[in-house]
């Protein structure tokens, strides 16, 4: 399962409203090769659910993850920070053995 913090939920709802996206759009979380630690996180909105996608809903936020990415993201919490030390979404990923300084990439 992928969970969503209260701060991340607020930001996702606002971003969807600002982009005039309806409820058919879900938050798509994925992992791609790259970044300084080997794997990097990606977030986007998507209105398509593919046959092998895993779907989750937490605090009213619908999240879809492709099966390959789910292997890396299982148990992850999506959070959001707007503090002085950084602004944006970040992943609290229990599967990551190492993360980079900026938090955008990781390795297992």
Image (cartoon, rainbow, N blue to C red):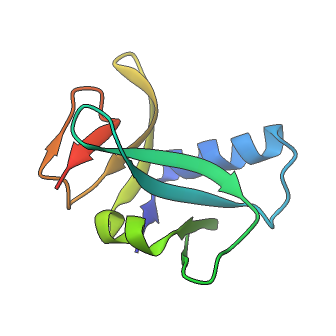
> Residue placed farthest to the left in the image?
97
Image position, residue 14 (x, y; %): 72, 42
Residue drawn at x 29%, y 27% is 102
- In the rendered view, tell whether residue 26 sits above or below residue 43: below
Is 105 left, or right, of 108 in this rendering? right
Which quadrant of the structure image shows residue 55? bottom right
- In the rendered view, tell whether residue 99 sits above or below residue 82: below
Q: Is 108 in front, or is 7?
A: 108
Image position, residue 95 (x, y; %): 20, 61
Residue drawn at x 63%, y 48% is 12
Q: Is 10 in front, or is 95?
A: 95
Q: Quadrant of the C terminus?
A: bottom left
> Residue placed farthest to the front in the image?
33
Image position, residue 35 (x, y; %): 31, 34
**Mark count:** 0
Is 28 left, or right, of 32 in this rendering? right
- In the rendered view, tell whether residue 97 sits above or below residue 95: above
Which quadrant of the structure image shows residue 5? bottom left
Q: In the rendered image, is residue 59 in sight?
A: no
Image position, residue 16 (x, y; %): 75, 47
- In the rendered view, tell whether residue 103 sits above or below residue 60: above
Is 73 left, or right, of 64 in this rendering? left
Q: In the rendered image, is residue 38 in sight?
A: yes
> Residue placed farthest to the bottom in the image?
51
Q: Quadrant of the N terminus?
A: bottom left
Residue drawn at x 76%, y 64% is 47
């Amino acid at each position: 399962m992928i969970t969503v913090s209260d701060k991340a939920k607020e930001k996702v709802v606002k971003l969807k409203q600002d982009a005039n996206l309806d409820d058919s759009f879900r938050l798509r979380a994925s992992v791609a090769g790259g970044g300084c630690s080997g794997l990097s996180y990606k977030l986007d909105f998507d209105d398509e659910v593919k046959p092998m996608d895993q779907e989750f809903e937490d605090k009213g936020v619908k999240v879809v993850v492709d099966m390959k990415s789910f292997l890396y993201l299982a148990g992850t919490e999506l959070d959001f920070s707007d503090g002085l030390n950084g602004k944006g979404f970040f992943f609290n990923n229990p599967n990551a053995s190492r993360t980079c300084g900026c938090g955008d990439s990781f390795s297992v």
